[in-house]
Amino acid sequence: MAANIFIRSVELRPNPAVAGEAFTISVEIGDRVSALADHDGSLITDTDGMGLWIPEGALVLADWDKLPVADADGSIIETEE
């Protein structure tokens, strides 16, 4: 099963750490999203340049602003299970 999070950043305090001394490791996590890409791995974007993604558990495509993606006729594009 794939993880549903990804690690955004990691911070070590103090940095550099000293052997035998206390230190803190902080990790910032984010939600994993399924981005749409072409065969070259380039993100597919909308007319505003925002990447398209499939929200976890949703059947409606959305851009990075979480706005539904519509076709030229204005119909919202849905995925199939």
Image (cartoon, grey):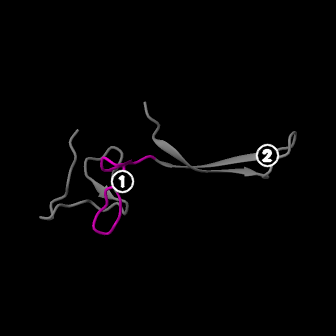
Q: Is residue 46 left or right of residue 13?
A: left
**Image: magenta residue range:** 32-51
**Quadrant of the image for the N terminus?**
top left
The amino acid on which the numbered mark 2 sits, given as a three-letter code, is Phe
Q: In the current view of this chain or complex, which residue is farthest to the top?
A: 1
Residue 21 position by quadrant: top right
Image location of residue 31, percent across then percent down: 46, 48
Residue 65 higher or lower than 15, as above or below: below
| N-terminal label among 1 and 2 | 2
Image x and y of residue 48, in percent: 32, 69
- Report the disc number at residue 3: none
Provide residue 23's location: percent of width, then percent of height.
79, 46
Does residue 74 lie above or below 44 as drawn?
A: below
Residue that label 1 marks: 42
At x 36%, y 53%, the residue is 42
| Residue identifier under label 2 | 23
Label 1 and label 2: CA atoms lie apart by: 39 Å
Q: Nearer the viewer, residue 42 or 14?
A: 42
